[in-house]
């Protein structure tokens, strides 16, 4: 179940729901078949609950290949950090919660 600070992102809602947000955005590019993605998703859910200034956008690459191409995604999971409408970081592979907090803060 997605927390209120977690949004399923599509090419039709990315502008209105994600890029217009004043929060720090983490776009999680994932796929159901990726075992590594299954490790990262619960960590991001925890961060969404604990950090009200972070918005998680989940992009299923199987359904949104155009978004994956637009952000240069070549490996899963990939997290794209966006602040003030600009990509500030790209994190490839699974990370611990502590590592993600260090990267984000």
Image (cartoon, rainbow, N blue to C red):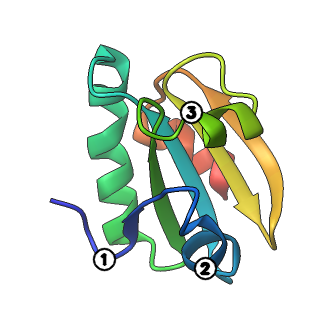
Spatial CA span between label 2 and label 3: 19 Å
Tell me the tag on residue 16: 2
- In the image, what residue occupies the spot 58% across and 56% down? 11
Write down the residue under mark 1.
4
- Residue 20 visible? The answer is yes
Pick whichever of labels 1 and 2 is earlier in the sequence: 1
Q: Residues within 10 Å of mark 1 (few under 14, many from 20)?
A: few
What residue is rendered at 53% in x and 20% in y?
93
Q: Which mark is residue 63?
A: none
Q: Secondary structure at mark 3?
A: helix
- Report whether residue 71 is seen: no
Instruction: Measuring from the top left, give residue 81's x and y in whole percent.
Output: 68, 51
- Label 3: how many residues lie within 10 Å, few (<14), some (14-19) or many (20+)? some
Q: CA distance from mark 1 to mark 2?
A: 16 Å
Along the line of sight, which residue is nearer the eye, 38 or 30?
30
- Chain-order first, disc 2 or disc 3: 2
Reading the image, the residue beneath label 3 is: 65
**Could you say where residue 98 lies in the image, as x and y percent from the top left?**
47, 41
* x 57%, y 55%: residue: 26
Give the mark toward the camera: 1 or 3.
3
Position of the C terminus, as image quadrant, is bottom right
Pointer 2 and pointer 3: residues touching (CB < 8 Å)?
A: no
User: On the picture, is 82 further left or further right than 8?
Assistant: right
Does residue 53 lie above or below 93 as drawn?
below
In this rendering, is residue 5 above or below 31?
Answer: below
**Gap in Å between the C-alphas at discs 1 and 3?**
25 Å
Q: Find the residue positioned furthest to the left.
A: 1
**Looking at the image, which residue is at 43% across and 32% down?**
30
Q: Are the two marked residues, 1 and 3, in contact with CB atoms closer than 8 angstroms?
A: no
Nearer the camera: disc 1 or disc 2: 2
In this view, the residue in front, 49 or 67, is 67
């Amino acid at each position: 179940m997605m927390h209120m600070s977690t949004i399923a992102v599509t090419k039709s809602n990315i502008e209105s729901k994600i890029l217009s947000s004043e929060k720090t955005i983490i776009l999680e590019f994932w796929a159901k078949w990726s075992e590594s993605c299954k490790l990262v998703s619960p960590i991001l859910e925890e961060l969404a609950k604990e950090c009200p200034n972070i918005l998680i956008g989940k992009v299923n690459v199987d359904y949104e290949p155009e978004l994956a191409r637009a952000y240069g995604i070549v490996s899963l999971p990939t997290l794209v950090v966006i602040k003030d409408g600009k990509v500030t970081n790209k994190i490839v592979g699974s990370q611990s919660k502590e590592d993600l907090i260090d990267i984000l803060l």
